[in-house]
Image (cartoon, rainbow, N blue to C red):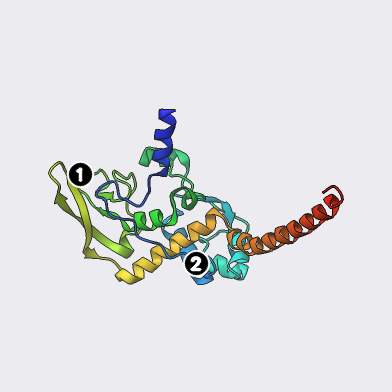
Amino acid sequence: MKKLLQSCLLLLMPLGVFASGGIDLESADIDLSDNTSLENGAHLYVQYCLGCHSTKYLRYLNLADDFNLDEQEILNKVAPEGAGIYDKMLTAMNGHDAKRWFGTQPPDLSLIARSRGADWLYSYLKGFYTDPTKPLGVNNVVFPDVGMPNPLWQLQGEQMALYKNTGDQEVITALVLEEDGTMSEDEFDQAVNDIVTFLVYAGEPAQLERRSMGKYVLLFIFIFGVIAYLLKKEYWKDVH
């Protein structure tokens, strides 16, 4: 029983704290009705993430239908060169090479937003910093000892970590930009937010439709409940 309670407490611990220094996660601004954000997020995902990570439950046709875009537009604006509208969003990297280069095959990201949360993803993509002690030269405040490079370093630039000595150990208090990227800070924040919005969509493409149907389902349950109550009163009135 004690072990069960401990496990439940671990599951309920908030993810809003960085393991490396107690810095709160940043909040992502997710709007699944914003097709411009979704399109840009998909475009950036294909450019900077699809080289290693698939989203195998999506086809480019799904994006065209859900983003209200023409099929040719999706192929031109989002899909990699040579992709077809019915192709799945699969990485071109084979598993053998991935294991040889990274030690393991990079995971599919179809459900990453559902398992980690939008705020975690947003903070993770912004949380890379230079760390010469690591094999790849970078680390991450959200995911210490991360096993991948910063995929967005060209856009963001390079960050360095500021530390504070707490007596027992040094903890990260902030990240500061030491080398500019091709985007300004605001532009990069919006780009990361668009990628996270796309990944939230990828985790449940029918989310908006489900929410819009919810009010009608509740209305039906309410009307059915009233009818059932009136029938119950009519049926039992002679008994009472």
Q: Which picture quadrant has residue 9?
A: top left
Task: Work out whether residue 52 or residue 107 is closer to the camera in this orientation and state it.
Answer: 107
Amino acid type shown at disc 1 = Thr
Q: In terms of secondary structure, where does tag 2 sit?
A: loop
Contact, mark 1 vs mark 2 (Cβ under 8 Å) = no
Q: Residues within 10 Å of mark 2 (few under 14, many from 20)?
A: some
Picture coordinates of residue 175 (x, y %)? Answer: 23, 58
For mark 1, what is the residue?
133
Which disc, if any, is residue 172? none
Q: In the rendered view, tell whether residue 95 sits above or below residue 118.
A: above
* Number of the label disc, if any, that sits on residue 31: 2
Residue placed at 49% from the left, 62% from the top?
Answer: 42
Query: Residue at (33%, 47%) from the top-left corner?
Result: 143
Please give the name of the residue rendered at 40% of the width and 66% of the height, measured from the top-left corner: 191
Q: Quadrant of the N terminus?
A: top left
Q: Nearer the viewer, residue 69 or 124?
A: 124
Q: Residue 124 appears at what percent x and percent y?
A: 35, 54
Relative to 155, 52 lies left or right? right
The amino acid type found where label 2 is placed reads Asp
